[in-house]
Amino acid sequence: EDQVTQSPEALRLQEGESSSLNCSYTVSGLRGLFWYRQDPGKGPEFLFTLYSAGEEKEKERLKATLTKKESFLHITAPKPEDSATYLCAVPGIYNKLIFGAGTRLAVHP
Amino acid sequence: EAGVTQFPSHSVIEKGQTVTLRCDPISGHDNLYWYRRVMGKEIKFLLHFVKESKQDESGMPNNRFLAERTGGTYSTLKVQPAELEDSGVYFCASSQKLFTEAFFGQGTRLTVV
């Protein structure tokens, strides 16, 4: 069965303290892996798509990487405005997204 | 470019009543999806339209849920009659092609009391 597991569930960082979020996946035939950011009361906001092992994407303080079994979202020198829930998802059959439970990130000044 | 728009943003209804949620996808996106997050759980797939046709409705909980997509444009999701366990946040998303990024609306928070 297709599955996505994210860790940790919650992460508290000081401003400037770099860290990584993990997304492990089990899917029959990877057709992409998506990272989203979700703020309270809003819908998921698209961040990155990764399609093949070894691929990396960057946006401001975020960098996403992909291996054959997992993806990492690296946050470099985070700021309080990076606080959000970060979601990872993979497409299953017919492109329905299978989401992980997310990592709640809190960055304190 | 306008994003995915959902109406209403909040709805509180009594058990047994009917509610209709609406989604306007990004113009030109043939693929439209409905997802739901219930309290404390991850976001779960409900169904997928390609233009006006239902491609996959394997995630629909039961026959109290009815989704339509008129002319391949906007979509509605009707819950009739609503039950307490239907409470949650309903998200709509659209994408241009399969296996490419989907863009989400802000969600409709449904509370059944």
Image: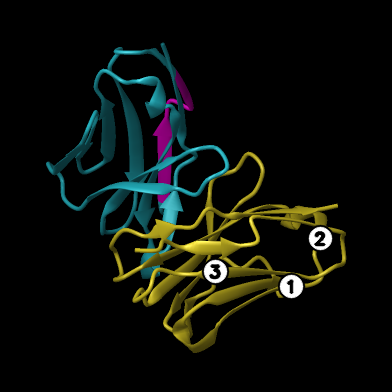
Chain colours: A cyan, B yellow
Q: Is residue A83 left or right of residue A75?
A: right
Question: What residue sits right under mark 2 in the picture?
Answer: B83
Q: Residue furthest front?
A: B1
Question: What residue sits right under mark 1 in the picture?
Answer: B64
| Mark 2 / mark 3, whichever is N-terminal | 3
Question: SS class of the residue under badge 1?
Answer: loop
Q: Position of residue B76 (x, y in %)?
A: 61, 74
- Subunit of label 2: B
Rendered image: mark on residue B38: none
Q: Which mark is in front, 1 or 3?
A: 3
For image coordinates 71% across by 75% down, the residue present is: B63
Q: Position of residue B11 (x, y in %)?
A: 74, 57
Q: Please say whether residue B2 is one of the residues in the magenta stretch.
A: no
Question: Which region is colored magenta?
Answer: A3-11
Q: Position of residue B61 (x, y in %)?
A: 66, 65
- Position above or below: A15 against B87: above
**Marks 1 and 3 share the same chain:** yes
Question: What residue sits right under mark 3 in the picture?
Answer: B23
> Disc 1 marks which amino acid?
Arg
> Disc 3 marks which amino acid?
Cys
